[in-house]
Image (tube, coloured by chain):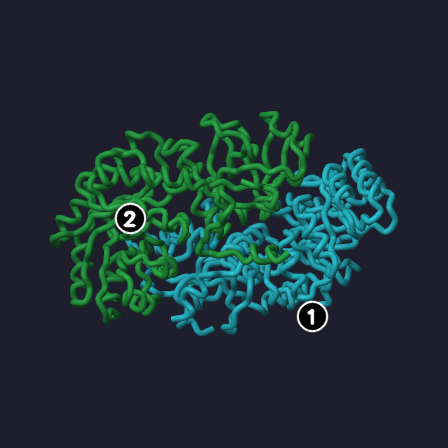
Chain colours: A green, B cyan
Amino acid sequence: MDTASITGPQLVIDKDICLGNIQVMAEKAGKEGLILRPHFKTHQSLEVGRWFREYGVERITVSSLEMAYYFAADGWKDILVGIAYNPREYKYYESLSEDTGLLLTIAGPGSAEILARQCRSQMEVMIKIDTGYNRTGIRWDDDKSLRDCIKKLRVNKKIRIRGLMTHDGNTYALNKATDIKDRNKQTIQRLTACRDIAGIPDLVLSTGDTPSLSRAEDFQGINEIRPGNFIFYDLMQYVKGNCRLNDIAISMICPVIDIRPRSETVVIHGGAVHLSKESINASGKNIFGIVFRYDDKRTDAGNGVYLTSLSQEHGIIDCSASSFADDLNIGDLLTVLPVHSCLTADCMGGYLLTDGSSADHMRGRNQDSLLSGL
Amino acid sequence: MDTASITGPQLVIDKDICLGNIQVMAEKAGKEGLILRPHFKTHQSLEVGRWFREYGVERITVSSLEMAYYFAADGWKDILVGIAYNPREYKYYESLSEDTGLLLTIAGPGSAEILARQCRSQMEVMIKIDTGYNRTGIRWDDDKSLRDCIKKLRVNKKIRIRGLMTHDGNTYALNKATDIKDRNKQTIQRLTACRDIAGIPDLVLSTGDTPSLSRAEDFQGINEIRPGNFIFYDLMQYVKGNCRLNDIAISMICPVIDIRPRSETVVIHGGAVHLSKESINASGKNIFGIVFRYDDKRTDAGNGVYLTSLSQEHGIIDCSASSFADDLNIGDLLTVLPVHSCLTADCMGGYLLTDGSSADHMRGRNQDSLLSGL
């Protein structure tokens, strides 16, 4: 990539790595007879979304109604809106469902009752089951609420219950493959038990967390998977062992703006508005990224050079444990692997590809246009 | 405000509170004979920026070159770019300085040498002094580097050294007014000592951290202040005692999307992409916001209702210590006071005002247009 035109922080996608990540997941889904309905909240990009089509993907998940509109405009016809139904958005759901196959997510009897009252056109819904993560949905062991939810939806004949879905966010905290596999097994058991309670024929059972879908192998009992993060991966997934460092498909290029030998730090233009404030623990430190020289090869052992502090626009690299800063110059470019790729992409609102072309992000970016006219 | 049209998370500015915050700071600056050069990185809004003009503000600070372009286009003619000079951006600095009075920030001899080599038109610079925060700039006790930096800049006669600036981020961690005042005094002493070393006539001494400028009263020795956060304030400032809860001028309105009595939680549409992942410790918990009913009055004692978990689009409110959730319904609107207003504003990329009008943010927002056509 020609880096001469890079002045400030730029988020770069390595398309080859993305395609590799998609292929692994598509093959796993194919082998297990699962529908792959990837979550597009990670990349939020029409361009990146199109890459999935070559692997036979026709159904997608999004995390907001705005995102459903964004992807529907690019021809996606089967979209699950994964966030719990918000009755204030009914008219937008109705409008979009005229041309696009939409699946709503119903989190419980309360929203079921409201939707049944509002709904004037055909609507297909997934019921959200909380299999233990304790974020949203009906608890797996709350038979009464599940039956009540179904009953309330059935009041309106225009509503069709298509399936049960869960997101087990607990796996993001696990390290060992065996623990993730055990948890995945439990999730599937709990979802299957809910299907038995629901007693509706042909219900789709859908799960979706990148750790399970990266490391478990047995998905018997479910029909659909909704991984999101795996397209890019990130340090959160890397430190847990869910990917290799070379599976991380996005990186932030940042210029060095200060070198401080006495503090043993290097300062980059690249802060919380670029990377997000998401941090993880690595080698006993709270870190915001792993840093490499722009042209250096990544090694899975890492190099011990971390971004240890972020303010709005500045990132501070701790160089105390290495000779990283020794021949560095102001204006040099460094590569930062982000902690949480979904949030970093959302902060940046756009991408560069390694071939020098650019890719969209739903958030857009005014900044581009500010400097592009010069 | 008419809330019927609010469907998803919206960031609302209370203009009256902003004007009150500006007035307090403008009066303090006036009384102390200080130039008020507010930092516009907090709001990043042309509309909000214009409010300062009524208080006689003509000079501003920004945190990136893009931001300088953004505000220059609205007629601001004296702009300090507070981030350390990045030599990759030289041509943009040069171009912008044709019509706009620009001040560059030089972090040390390294960038001074590069700028002196690059500079072909008149450039005015501030030298960044590190008075103890240890982020960027020349350490206050590093006479040699300061002299070296000045010497390197003077190689090029087009460069004029206008002043010395510091940002003492350490005050953000302090609680007590006496500690903040002591620290402010130390900062001014260190900056003044650097002026003596520099030995350049009429050097402007500039400081800028919201805690000191909110709580200290003695600024003798300096010429200019650059507070940013004070226009909105936020929970970070509130918990440290730098503002009252009623001085916080922005709030996020979010709809309830799930109510979970067994978990004693309420779920809103409002997550890390809206509020940022910045958190603080309050009542022994790690929190991402204080939550009120939309129409409730804020009390400085708070109500003990906190946002205790954030994922990309979801926010989880812990209601275990209160009856907050008792008569709440799906679709109700809640108000969240954000932890760090600068980052929340940057995430949202736009504002509503309490009169129902909207205000710009440099980041812009594609989302608006996605639903606005319906």
Judged from the image, the secondary structure of the residue bearing numbered disc 1 is loop
Residue at 56% in and 61% down: B361
Q: Quadrant of residue A245?
A: top left
Residue at 66% in and 44% down: B88
Residue at 16% in and 61% down: A151
Q: Determine if residue B295 is in view.
A: yes
| Residue A213 horizontal/vertical position (percent) | 29, 39
| Residue A217 horizontal/vertical position (percent) | 24, 34
Q: Is residue B304 left or right of residue A134?
A: right
The count of marks equals 2
Residue at 16% in and 52% down: A203
Q: Amino acid at mark 2?
A: Val
Chain under disc 2: A
Judged from the image, the secondary structure of the residue bearing numbered disc 2 is loop
Q: Which residue is mark 1?
A: B54
**What is the crowding at mark 1: few (fewer than 14 residues within 10 Å), some, or many (at least 20)?**
few
Q: Determine if residue B323 is in view.
A: no
Q: Is residue B222 left or right of residue A240?
A: right
Q: Which residue is mark 2?
A: A57
Q: For the C terminus of chain B, give its image quadrant.
A: bottom left
Q: Nearer the viewer, mark 1 or mark 2?
A: 2
Does residue A192 sit above or below B227 in this rendering?
A: above
Does residue A236 sit above or below B318 in this rendering?
A: above
Does residue A361 sit above or below A214 in this rendering?
A: below
Q: Amino acid at mark 1?
A: Glu
| Residue B356 horizontal/vertical position (percent) | 49, 73
